[in-house]
Image (cartoon, rainbow, N blue to C red):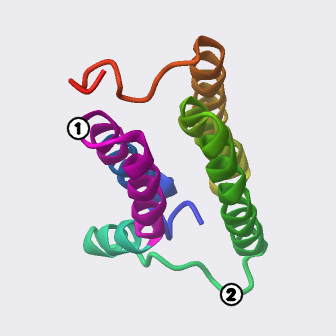
Amino acid sequence: MRFAYYGGALGMLTSATVWLIAGIVSVVVSPERAFWALFIGGMFIHPVSGLLTKAIGRPGKHSASNPFGSLALATTFWMILMMPLAYGVSRLHIEWFFPAMLFIIGGRYLTFATIFGARTYWFCGATLALAGLALGRASASPGRVLRRDN
């Protein structure tokens, strides 16, 4: 998995880019549109990172017998199943959307520590979860501070 996917580095870069775009959409357009930017952009993380991985000469595909492939697939399904929860809480309180997504993605990154055999993902997962906790506790308004419609 580590060799095939370049340790997940290009997936992390692609994910960070999608989060950045969603953040910009939240500030410039609306938090509601940011949900869709993150959701739709998230669907492209694996394909785009796979193309980037192949572009640098790695296979971008693991062997069918690799048991970590099942773990990656299971956590993908778990993440997708949790997204309606993040959407649901955002309908109650829009400021809960990004914290909920940070918890979901942070949890997935924790499994990447096993999939890629890199402790860095423990740090990344914990950082995402702590950021979600901090945003949630602060009731941080997603983007409204900088927009003129206040």
Magenta segment, principal secondary structure?
A: helix
List the single residue furthest toward the front: 149
Which residue does the image show at 30% across and 47% down from the upper left? Answer: 21
Residues rendered magenta in the picture: 21-46
- Give the secondary structure at mark 1: helix
Q: Is residue 116 above or below residue 102?
A: below
- Image quarter where the N terminus lies is bottom right
Q: Position of residue 114 (x, y in %)?
A: 73, 51
Q: Amino acid at mark 1?
A: Val
Task: Tell me what residue is drawn at x 38 percent, y 51 percent.
Answer: 33
In the picture, measured across the screen, residue 121 lies left or right of residue 42, that is: right
Residue 90 x/y as whole percent: 60, 42
Q: Is 24 placed above or below 48 here? A: above
Circle 2 residues within 10 Å: few <14, some 14–19, many ≥20: few
Q: Position of residue 55 (x, y in %)?
A: 26, 73
Across and down, in percent, residue 7 comes to 51, 55
Tell which of 84 and 52 is nearer to you.
84
* Outermost residue, top side: 138
**Nearer to the camera, 14 or 99:** 99
Mark 1 = which residue?
A: 28
Residue 64, numbered circle: 2
Kindly identify the amino acid type of the residue bearing the numbered disc 2. Ala
Q: Nearer the viewer, mark 1 or mark 2?
A: 1
Identify the mark nearer the N-term, 1 or 2: 1
